[in-house]
Image: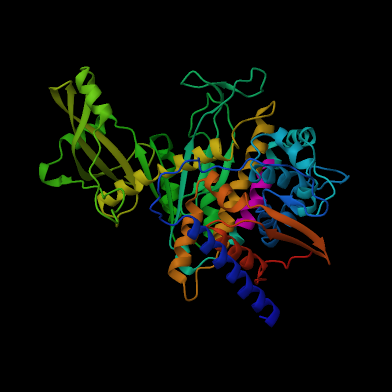
Amino acid sequence: MSNSKAQKKVERKRKLINRKRRIQYRLRDINWAAQDEPMFTASNIHYELADRVRGLASGGIGAMHLEARRTGLIEAIDRRLHLLKIHKPYHESDHVLNIAYNILCSGTCLEDIELRRNDEVYLDALGTQRIPDPTTAGDFCRRFKRSHIQILMNAINDVRVGVWQEQPESFFEEAIIDADGTIAHTTGECKEGMDICHKGEWGYGPLVVSLANTGEPLYLSNRSASRPSYEGAAWYLDRAGALCERAGFKRILYRGDTDFSQTQYLDGWDAKGRCFIFGIDAMSNLVETAENLPEKQWKRLNRPAKYEVKTVPRESPDNVKERIVRERGFKNIRLKSEDVAEFPYRPVACKKTYRVVVVRKNLSVEKGEQVLFDDIRYFFYITNDTSMPANEIVFSANDRCNQENLIEQLKNGVRAMQMPLDNLVSNWAYMVMASLAWTLKAWFALSLPETGRWAAKYKSEKSAVLRMEFKTFLNAFMRVPCQIIRGGGRIVYRLLSWNPWQHVFLRGVDALHTVSKWRHPLRC
């Protein structure tokens, strides 16, 4: 590192420490006396137009564009995806990133692109004369055919492999691939491909196949809401497994609920050395087998605490909901205990016998203060993993619920599933491009180094950024007010405020400026 760069890093660290110290001083504990006036005292407020100094509210967009350039995402999209015969003036990557960047800058719909388009500072910050308007962005989505969407997802996943290969060796111990479907509700009446689901809602039924390790959506598929949630899942699971094997993962684990235990595929996955844990319906033959198991085979299932109390345990508040249920005599089902057992089972569509882990829930059915009767319910999981203890199989299967959090973030955080266009395929294309905003968030977290003197702290911060909700990420890393300065062949983002995540943000930017063996150096 040159002396000038070292001096700049020292100066930057000094400024960060000073800014942090100033805010901590203002927020220090004070034994306040009674105040005669409110704390908000500003009154003589005026607005003026700046002459030369120009600012950008979403200053983190520069880091996201660095991420897209460093990883080779821009080149991969333009090399693989061909939807435009002539680039006058936009390339395919311009359209794709235009939609993703709009969401990263707090846009919630295609129309918000117009705000970015009329922001001169935003355009200068990205080094562009103009960006596509909302109508042009919508027209670009309508150019897609199903094959083009597959090409775009493959291009993104090829880049994803490169991002993964920058991770430490422990990252590749196991790839956990989850699959689930959801309903994307729409109030439109003329959207081709929409249908009514089992809940009586109109819309589409997207399929999400994701990597649980990082929360990245690997494949997205749009379908009518009336289609079964498992439709097409096996094909995408195969592709996701091949992708993770190509990246170097030593073990592949598929997970899904009862709708995804498609027994005709289990032998094939087992033959490829891929593990699976799927829920399986409580069919009468399985229930009969569980009821006939000797009592000595059942073991109590003790679930770990949801979190560790780091200070003094607090007194639990009154359960208002439970009190009202008792007072009004509502029917209530209370869990008394859980037991776990296992037995061999060969599904009709399989040639091999697999392991079924069963959870017996011992329930008490109550009405008000009166116990009506005891009840027992069984939950089954089928797996080809013979080494993991039965209770760990159950915990792993239950951890798949974290994918519901990812789907919630894609739906209501990123708003990738708002289905703004007029047909199934164009909405599918928008969903893939919009979800790229979440992917760039994950890639930024993965780019954070976790070595050196403060390795434990860096690893904890990296994990925290990776698990962040999208809104929290926007507040911490994207809504960073910056002064934009252009000159000398450089675009400088001068930070104008401080937040507790700023040192992590700058460490990530430093990592993006580091040329590695597979990334291309930045040209600007």
Residue ID at (58%, 52%): 441
Q: Please state, as top left, top right, bottom left or bottom right, where the N terminus lies in the image.
A: bottom right
Using the image, determine if residue 416 lies above or below residue 246: above
Which segment did they paint magenta?
149-160
- For this rendering, which residue is in front, 37 or 275? 37
Residue 459 higher or lower than 52, as above or below: below
Which one is in front, 277 or 327? 327
Image point (48%, 34%), residue name: 230
Main secondary-structure element of the magenta-colored stretch: helix
- Is residue 344 visible in the rendered image? The answer is yes
Measured from the top left, where is residue 54 in percent x and y?
77, 52
Task: Indicate the quadrant where residue 377 lies.
Answer: top left
Question: Would you say residue 461 sits in the magenta stretch?
Answer: no
In the image, residue 252 above or below residue 137: below
Q: Find out whether residue 159 is within the magenta segment.
A: yes
Q: Please name whichever residue, 38 or 6, is drawn nearer the observer in this view of the structure.
A: 38
Q: How is the image coloured?
A: rainbow
Residue 451, given in percent of the width and then of the height, sits at 50, 72
Residue 321 at x, y percent in the picture: 28, 27
Q: Is residue 350 left or right of residue 288?
A: right
Q: Quadrant of the C terminus?
A: bottom right
Q: Horizontal placement of 155 versus 341: left or right?
A: right
